[in-house]
Image (cartoon, helix red, strand yellow):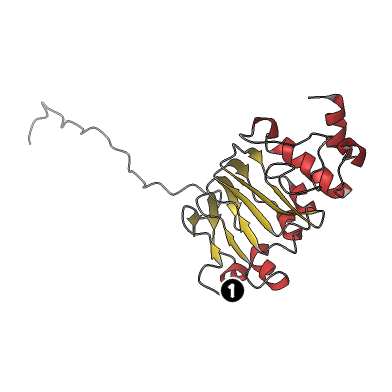
Amino acid sequence: MSILFLICIFIGSHSCFGQSTCSDAANFSLTAIYTSMDGPNWALNEGWMDSSIDPCGGSDNWYGLTVSSSVISRFEMRANNLIGTLPSQFGLLTDVKRLRLSTHGLTGTIPSQLGMLSLLTSLRIDTGSFTGRIPSWLGLMSLIGNSNYNFKLTNNELCGTIPPEVSAISGGNKFQVETGNSIDTACGIPSPQPTQLPSFPPTPLPTGIPIP
């Protein structure tokens, strides 16, 4: 890892990205994503962190990014060997309308900063190892975004109850969350084990005591 790349991680400088026409916030977010999700070991990472390639200059300049009107509108990676945690800086990609990270090795909780993606209409982060409760802001997104908003969080390790904000979303396939998660299971509390009474060996009756 170069010294320049380390500087970019800490300061998010626009100059670190050479030809980038993305905003400083988007550049910083992309750096955090690449670092937090083990970008060097992705199955496909064409273009990423190459200062000669503009991530906002066109779709697929950086693998997984779709660009519309010089802003990142989609972030989609499936089965791409994503490992690590989902960084809070994802919330800085405020023009993203579709986020898909399916079949991954990501762990930890789903950051609340994803709620900053006010244009989001489709969120799919299924088949991984996310833990913690289902975020209530998922339900609020349908109030400020597109009426076709939907999300899929199946096959993770989420727990707790479905927030009322999420349950209030109408429509058949607006959200998918129950399959493969520990819904209605208390978070962080181990399942109770059956109580076993201690067992003792039988006590032999005394012998040689005269009967009156």
- Image: 116 above or below 189: below
Describe residue 177's horizontal placement relative to residue 45 as left or right.
left
Q: Quadrant of the N terminus?
A: top right
Tell me which residue sits at (86%, 43%) in the image.
Answer: 20
- The answer to which of 89 and 72 lies nearer the viewer is 72
Which residue, given by chain and number where applicable, does mark 1 sit on?
A: 168
- The answer to which of 149 and 114 lies nearer the viewer is 149
Query: How many numbered tags mark residues here?
Result: 1
The answer to whether one can see residue 17 in this image is yes
Estimate the x, y position of residue 92 in percent, counting from the top left: 80, 52
Q: Quadrant of the C terminus?
A: top left
Estimate the x, y position of residue 189 in percent, counting from the top left: 52, 49
Disc 1 residue type? Ala
Tell me which residue sits at (59%, 72%) in the image.
Answer: 169
Which residue of the protein is positioned furthest toward the left in this rendering? 211
Which residue of the protein is positioned furthest toward the front in this rendering? 58
Q: Secondary structure at mark 1?
A: loop
Describe residue 104's horizontal placement relative to residue 88 as left or right.
left
The answer to whether one can see residue 135 in this image is no
Estimate the x, y position of residue 52 in percent, counting from the top left: 84, 35
- The answer to which of 88 and 200 lies nearer the viewer is 88
Estimate the x, y position of residue 161 in percent, counting from the top left: 54, 62
- Image: 15 above or below 98: above
Within-10-Å neighbours for mark 1: few <14, some 14–19, many 20+: few
